[in-house]
Image: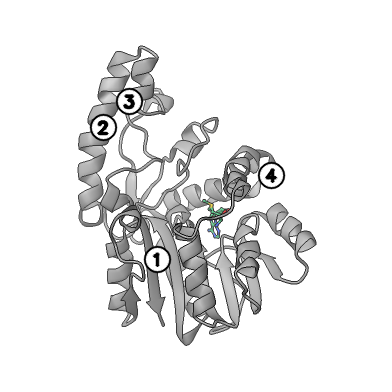
């Protein structure tokens, strides 16, 4: 009997650098639609918008990133995957007086940002095709975006291309390999955590979920790079198989790992730093500065 695709818990991970190009292109097309179409994005964006409901605290990852950018004295910055432009507003609040470019795949977000902030530059584009000349910016940054890229390596190359030599690309992303959890991967026969399933009396599903998350997924996350190949992506993320489930990172396809990003950059002869270290908050949230 064919497996109900909604209960499919297999790990469909593939190297985005060397994997099946047709499968990756299909994933890229579907993810672009997920992010780009306003009707589909509405609930997802509503979740992201809540970040601006409270002031950012000085010990938060966002605040640390903004301080780095402002402190670097960058005159021109580019944000890739800028969403609703909230970090642009926060940058200004922190005293950034330079030129800001925001790039985002969702055209309607860009149109909104351009109306709200005509003093900045907004363009619809992708991390793979930024539309700025080589070396155009002092700092390029991407805040929780790399893990959403179907082609992270391509994105890294393009983001570095637009950075002026000697200046920085700063990436913030969840280190799924370090934390041993990938929210876009279904565990058990339905979305959701084992504890929630247990509360609903779905005992078998809860037990399988627990096994999947603690054993199968966690152990695979540790070796994904070796077993699957470079820059592994989940080609069946929950955001596509269960569009009704809108939770953090159900759309994070890249099995993001700071070690992989750092190794890749070092192989290109670039300097890599973790400006806030790799402990506590920064164990699960990687902040990686790559100097060109
Ligand atoms: C988790 S959201 C973060 C958005 C924003 N940085 C924020 O903090 O609100 C991920 C963002 O990456 C964008 N994105 C996804 N794929 C992209 C791509 N290929 N190129 C550029 N941005 C992309 C999405 O549209 C979305 O706005």
Numbered disc in front, either 1 or 2: 2
Q: Residue 212 carries which label?
A: 2
Precedes in sequence: disc 4 or disc 3: 4
- In the picture as drawn, the residue positioned furthest to the front comes out as 58
Q: Does the residue labelled 4 lie within 8 Å of ligand 1?
A: no
Q: Tell me which label, 3 or 1, sits earlier in the chain.
A: 1
Judged left or right of residue 74, residue 106 is: right
Disc 3 secondary structure class? helix
The image's mark for residue 153 is 1
**Residue 266 on image: x %, y %:** 29, 77
**SS at circle 2:** helix
Residue position for label 3: 194
Q: Distance between the residues labelled 2 and 3?
A: 10 Å
Label 3, label 1: how many angstroms apart (C-alpha)? 33 Å
User: Alpha-carbon distance for marks 1 and 2?
Assistant: 28 Å
Q: From where the camera sits, is residue 1 visible? A: no
Nearer the observer: mark 4 or 3; the answer is: 3
Q: Could you tell me which secondary element the residue under label 4 belongs to?
A: helix
Q: Give the alpha-carbon distance from disc 4 to disc 3, as whole Å.
A: 32 Å
Counting residues from the start of the chain, the first of labels 1 and 2 encountered is 1
Q: Residue at x 53, y 48 (%)?
A: 31
Rendered view: 161 above or below 17: below
Q: Earlier in the sequence, mark 1 or mark 4?
A: 4
2 and 3 marks in contact (CB < 8 Å): no
Say which of marks 3 and 1 sits in front: 3
- Cα separation, mark 4 vs mark 2, equals 33 Å
Question: In this figure, which residue is indicated by the disc labeled 4?
Answer: 38
């Amino acid at each position: 009997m064919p497996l109900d695709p909604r209960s499919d818990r297999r790990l469909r991970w593939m190297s985005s650098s060397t994997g099946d190009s047709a499968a990756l292109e299909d994933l890229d097309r579907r993810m672009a639609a997920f992010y780009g179409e306003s009707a589909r994005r509405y609930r997802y964006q509503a979740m992201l918008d809540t970040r601006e409901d409270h002031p950012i605290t000085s010990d938060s990852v966002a605040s640390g990133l903004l301080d780095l950018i402002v402190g670097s004295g960058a005159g021109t910055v580019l944000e890739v995957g800028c969403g609703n432009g909230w970090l642009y507003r926060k940058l200004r609040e922190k005293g950034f007086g330079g030129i800001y470019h925001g790039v985002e795949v969702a055209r309607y977000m860009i149109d909104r940002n351009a109306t709200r902030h005509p003093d900045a530059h907004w363009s619809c584009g992708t991390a793979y095709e930024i539309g700025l000349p080589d070396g155009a910016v002092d700092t390029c940054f991407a805040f929780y975006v790399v893990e959403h890229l179907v082609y992270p390596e391509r994105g890294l190359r393009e983001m570095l291309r637009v950075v002026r030599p000697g200046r920085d690309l700063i990436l913030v992303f969840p280190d799924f390999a370090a934390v041993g959890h990938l929210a876009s991967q279904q565990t058990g026969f339905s979305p959701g955590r084992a504890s929630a399933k247990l509360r609903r009396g779905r005992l078998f599903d809860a037990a399988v979920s627990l096994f999947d998350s603690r054993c199968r997924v966690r152990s695979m996350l540790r070796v994904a790079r070796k077993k699957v190949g470079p820059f592994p992506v989940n080609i069946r993320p929950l955001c596509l198989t269960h569009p009704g489930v809108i939770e953090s990172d159900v759309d994070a396809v890249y099995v993001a790992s700071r070690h992989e990003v750092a190794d890749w950059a070092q192989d290109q002869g670039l300097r890599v730093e973790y400006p806030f270290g790799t402990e506590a908050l920064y164990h699960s949230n990687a902040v990686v500065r790559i100097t060109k």
